[in-house]
Amino acid sequence: MKTNPPTSGGQPSWSQQHRLQLGLVIAGALAVVLVSCGTVNRAVLAPPQIAGATFAGTESCADCHKQIVRDFNSSTHARLKALGPNAKDIGCESCHGAGSLHNASGGARGTIINPRKAPETCFQCHTDKRGEFSLPHHHPVLEGKISCGDCHDPHKGAAVIGGGTNLKRENETCAKCHTAQFGPFVFEHEAMREGCTTCHQPHGSVNDKMLITRNAALCAKCHFEQRTASGVFIGGADHTSRLSRGTCWTSGCHEAVHGSQVSPANRY
């Protein structure tokens, strides 16, 4: 049988190197398969911990919070529920921590986690929101002035208050605080019909006023430009010189961006 002679310096022959590389590739592929078979297709997170407490199960919460437990099945957060004897039907305790001490004490303070006062509980799953609240312009959740629960209902229906199939519009959630921007107006800005998030990023943004895009580029998303040899036309009017003065709402033009009582062009 013919064999390949060893190369100089005692190094393995080309065929030996080839077999070694092939073996490494096969081993790597098997490792990927084994890891893929052993993983799950969703995030696995440990519930908040309360020293000395054990999990009691959602049914025990219903003794005092009957309506909340009843409505929880309609909530988007109901997907957090873990079934089975080991999990004890964990639902409420996924966010509030183990409830045995809370139950035994009759609901004493400090025996359960209140996410309204501990936003880090929400950030365990919503990691991207933790980053958005750290941007220069954001709602003051990390500062403790408002909480996630002021805009979101984790216990019933869609997580966004006023969203989904609720009778209230999403805008009404924002209107609880931003009353002046809500109107009603004689001449409304049509973007308000689409919702505040058409222009604003509610958790945080690098742009002033938590705008999703800065300058006139925000308005140009809906108010399309028509560029010709004679200038830039928006709404049939020549805006060539106007765009250089600043943003649409800071150059003395469309200052009533949410709506106006006197100007159909939302000038003031």
Image: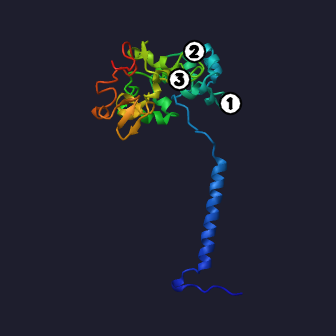
Residue 18 in which image quadrant:
bottom right
Q: Secondary structure at mark 2?
A: loop
Residue 108: give x, y in percent of width and height: 50, 16
Q: Could you tell whether 70 is left or right of 10 in the image?
A: right
Establish if 84 lies above or below 228.
above
Residue 167 shows which numbered tag? 2
The quadrant in which the N terminus is found is bottom right
> Where 255 sits versus 184, above or below?
below
Q: Quadrant of residue 25?
A: bottom right
Q: Using the image as rendered, state which of residue 50 and residue 226 is in the foreground.
A: 226
The vertical placement of 56 against 225, above or below, is: above
Identified by mark 1, the residue type is: Leu
Work out whether 96 lies above or below 12: above
| Earlier sequence position, callout 1 versus callout 2 | 1
Judging by the rendered image, the residue that carries numbered circle 1 is 83
Q: Please tell me how crowded label 1 is: few (under 14), some (14-19), or many (20+) other residues with Cα within 10 Å.
A: few
Depth check, mark 3 against mark 1: the one in front is 3
* Dot 3 or dot 1, earlier in sequence: 1
Which residue carries the number 3 mark? 160
Pointers 3 and 2 in contact (C-beta within 8 Å): no
Looking at the rendered image, the disc whose residue lies closer to the viewer, 1 or 2, is 2
Front-most of residues 237 and 167: 237
Q: Is residue 260 visible?
A: yes
